[in-house]
Image: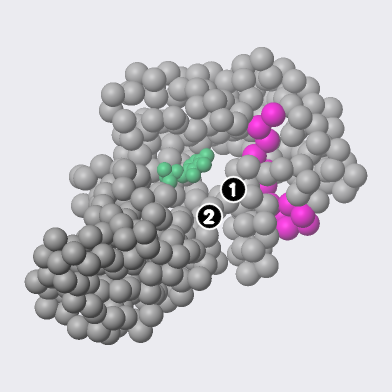
Amino acid sequence: MSKVGETTLVLDLSALEHNYNYLRSKIKPKTKFLGVVKAFAYGSDTVTIARELEQLGADYLAVAYVSEGMLLRNAGVKIPILVLHPLASNFEDLIVHRLEPSIYSRNILNQFLEVAKEKQQTDYPIHIKFNTGLNRLGFSEDDVDFIARETKHSGCIKIVSTFSHLAASEDANERDFSLLQINSFKNLSDALRKKIGYTPIRHMLNTSGIINYPNAQFEMVRSGIGLYGYGNQAEVDSQLKPVATLKTIISQIHEIKANQSVGYNRAFRSSNTIKSATLPIGHADGIGRQYGKGKGFVVINGEKAPIVGNVCMDMIMVDVTGIDCQEGDEVVVFGSDNSAENFASSANTISYEILTAISQRVKRVLIEA
Ligand SMILES: *Cc1c(COP(=O)(O)O)cnc(C)c1O
């Protein structure tokens, strides 16, 4: 990997292809694959990742919000895009950009019908979200009649899929609960199919669901984190490759003598002489203050250097005592050398959070497949 001269998120598209093929190998050839590219494609680069997934043969993409889908349409992405959490104020934009809404409540269904009618749509594709236990978004059993009635009497919308989301797909201790969710989803989808008289596709599994519940693939699966190289369990992580590697450089090295301090609020106090390196990356780049005071570490010339003192807005200081390094040397925060899962766990969080936290200030650089 080439050297960077500033803080850079290096995106490896061959890793994306590898992960896509791995996840595809876990599903039946006929099962459709939806790639989740919400939140800047898990903090990487929405358009780049979406285009690559389209080329690799993904059947669908998903984003959280309408604005994210518009970005993809404006970049020329053609495959269907499911918007997981559309809000009524964006329905016109959604229709103009041929984005497909997740319809998750009576209120949202009514409001979407109104806009679809006004815009004289016929068979506009929508996706019905069922709540099977996550209790976040979705219709319940009591709503099935309502959905069938409302969608039937107007020809302006068509249900292309029903779906639901597992609450604990990565947790073997919650296996019984996940199986209950899967069963309930199957029953709700069946009930709705009977009432509308046609057969929308069904999807339930996220990345850990694909790994742990191979019998619940239905007609499509939805994967996000796995595409970016993380699988929520060590055996899966070892089969995947991180797409994003966050790199930076050493700006300055200091010798800190005993009884001196480093950084704001003098949060680090030295008891003996150490060597510190200042790096041009801080909480404004996504490295939260929770990584400070010795919790998080970076990798310099293959060795671990813990963050000392408080994380500043634009900088962190790391302890490089005993590490052979110089100003200008490359630093890996996470990715190829130190997995994002590992980095995140140092501050009691998960890969999803650190990946999506990397701010737009950080330059993105691609390594083509
Ligand atoms: C984010 C999201 C996914 C992707 O989950 P991963 O664990 O990243 O694979 C799938 N489905 C829904 C509804 C989501 O919100």
Q: Which mark is residue 64?
A: 1
* Circle 2 residue: 39
Decide: few, some or many residues near mark 2? Use Cα within 10 Å; few <14, some 14-19, many ≥20: some
Q: Image point 38% across, 43% down: which residue? A: 207
Does residue 160 appear left or right of residue 276 in this picture? right
Q: Nearer the viewer, residue 272 or 36?
A: 272
Decide: is 37 above or below 129: below
The amino acid type found where label 2 is placed reads: Ala
Q: Quadrant of the N terminus?
A: bottom left
CA gap between label 2 and label 1 equals 7 Å
* CB at disc 2 and ligand 1 closer than 8 Å: no
- Which amino acid type is shown beneath numbered disc 1? Ala
Q: Which residues are magenta?
A: 93-105
Locate residue 259, reporting x and y percent: 18, 64
Horizontal placement of 219 versus 159: left or right? Answer: left
- Magenta span includes 213: no
- The x and y percentages for residue 75 are 63, 69
Residue at the extreme top of the image, as rendered = 142
| Quadrant position of the C terminus in the picture | bottom left
User: Picture coordinates of residue 133 (x, y %)?
Assistant: 50, 22
* Mark 2 / mark 1, whichever is N-terminal: 2
Residue 270 lies, in percent from the top left, at 18, 62
Q: What's the residue at 53%, 18% (across, down)?
A: 187
**For the residue labelled by badge 1, is the local secondary structure a helix, a strand or a loop?**
loop
